[in-house]
């Protein structure tokens, strides 16, 4: 394997366990910099982890959109992260890139705005600013492989966990509950069902101070495509832990780590995944794009002749 494993953490103890196991990279949601996740680390915990990380690469996740007031004190926090020797930021707001350059904070930037990272042409254009891109998890595996083949960046593809489907900086849940005069708690996720009765069509929905989020109910399972992704230049295989059972996630991460190190084969990896999570799906890996540009042109042409 030339690609690396990139995983989330549930707590500092688990992070140190992953470091000791030789996991390639951790993505860290720092309190105040990222949206609410399973675990948002504080800077004192971050300092402990940075001092014990060994060869494990640490990514700081800055996945929210920033307003003017958010930049107050941001230089101090980013300077502290930089002084800890951490150099990799995953950002969704291009303003962070400009902000860091202005203060000579020479981070490596990874574009986390996955919804826009759907083709290699725009990715190659933006690669003058970014070291890598989090690729959309709403495109078919063939499209993902095309991007990897034509891109020189270190790109990130999610291969396990709930997939983010939607984000809005509007407070959609609290607005709905206020309108319906129902009790609302922003400390929990709500599960939205639809008329199909299919669990795979259900959605996790939650809200924090930065907005509203929707995630798939089933977990993505991209294990069958790991070799293809690696052979086509994958930078990082990403495992998401949001709404995952902590113990099951821990076992799956360690199994992936053993697979990446060549200690177990794909069958053994998949046995661990299936044993610990029955609600898994190929999701968009196997979903063809509904309309291509050619399809849209044909539709436009037929509409003009009607």
Image: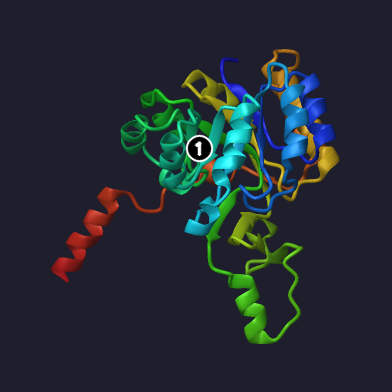
Circle 1: is it few (<14), some (14-19), or many (20+) Cα within 10 Å?
many
Residue under numbered circle 1:
134
Q: Position of residue 152 (x, y in %)?
A: 39, 23
SS class, disc 1: loop
- Residue depicted at x 75% and y 13%: 263
Query: In the image, 300: left or right of 41?
Result: left
Q: Quadrant of the N terminus?
A: top right
Q: Is residue 99 visible?
A: yes
Q: Is residue 255 above or below residue 116?
A: above
Q: Position of residue 261 (x, y in %)?
A: 70, 14
Q: Where is residue 97, by image quadrant? A: top left
- In this figure, which colouring scheme has been used for the structure? rainbow
Q: Is residue 268 visible?
A: no
Image mark count: 1
Q: Is residue 276 above or below residue 233?
A: below
Q: Is residue 217 above or below residue 131?
A: below
Q: Position of residue 201 (x, y in %)?
A: 63, 59
Q: Nearer the viewer, residue 153 or 71?
A: 71
Residue at the extreme left of the image, as rendered: 305
Query: In the image, 199: left or right of 65?
Result: right
Q: Nearer the viewer, residue 89 or 247?
A: 89
Q: Quadrant of the C terminus?
A: bottom left
Query: In the image, 187: left or right of 109?
Result: right
Query: In the image, 221: left or right of 70?
Result: right
- Residue depicted at x 46% and y 36%: 103
Q: Where is residue 23, by image quadrant? A: top right
Residue at the extreme top of the image, as rendered: 262
């Amino acid at each position: 394997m030339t690609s690396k494993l990139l995983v989330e953490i549930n707590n500092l103890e688990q992070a140190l366990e992953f470091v000791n196991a030789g996991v390639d990279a951790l993505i860290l949601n720092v309190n105040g910099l990222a949206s609410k996740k399973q675990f948002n680390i504080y800077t004192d915990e971050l300092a402990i982890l940075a001092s014990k990380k060994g060869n494990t690469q640490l990514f700081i996740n800055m996945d929210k959109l920033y307003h003017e007031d958010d930049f107050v004190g941001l230089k101090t926090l980013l300077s502290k992260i930089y002084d800890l020797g951490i150099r990799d930021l995953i950002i969704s707001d291009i303003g962070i890139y400009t902000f860091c350059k202005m203060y000579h904070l020479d981070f490596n930037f990874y574009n986390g705005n996955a919804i826009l990272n759907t083709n290699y042409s725009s990715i190659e254009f933006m690669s003058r600013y970014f070291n890598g891109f989090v690729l959309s998890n709403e495109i078919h595996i063939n499209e993902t492989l095309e991007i990897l083949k034509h891109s020189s960046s270190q790109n990130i593809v999610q291969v396990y966990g709930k997939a983010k489907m939607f984000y809005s900086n509007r407070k959609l849940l609290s607005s709905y509950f206020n309108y319906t005069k129902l009790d609302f708690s922003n400390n929990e996720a709500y599960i939205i069902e639809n008329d199909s009765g299919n669990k795979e069509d259900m959605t996790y929905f939650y809200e924090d101070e930065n907005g509203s989020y929707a995630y798939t109910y089933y977990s993505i399972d991209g294990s069958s495509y790991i070799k293809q992704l690696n052979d086509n230049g994958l930078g990082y295989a990403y495992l998401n832990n949001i709404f995952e059972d902590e113990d099951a996630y821990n076992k799956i991460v360690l199994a992936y780590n053993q697979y990446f190190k060549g200690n177990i084969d794909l069958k053994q990896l998949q046995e661990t995944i299936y044993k610990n999570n029955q609600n898994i799906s190929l999701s968009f890996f196997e979903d063809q794009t509904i309309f291509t540009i050619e399809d849209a042109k044909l539709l436009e042409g037929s509409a003009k002749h009607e």
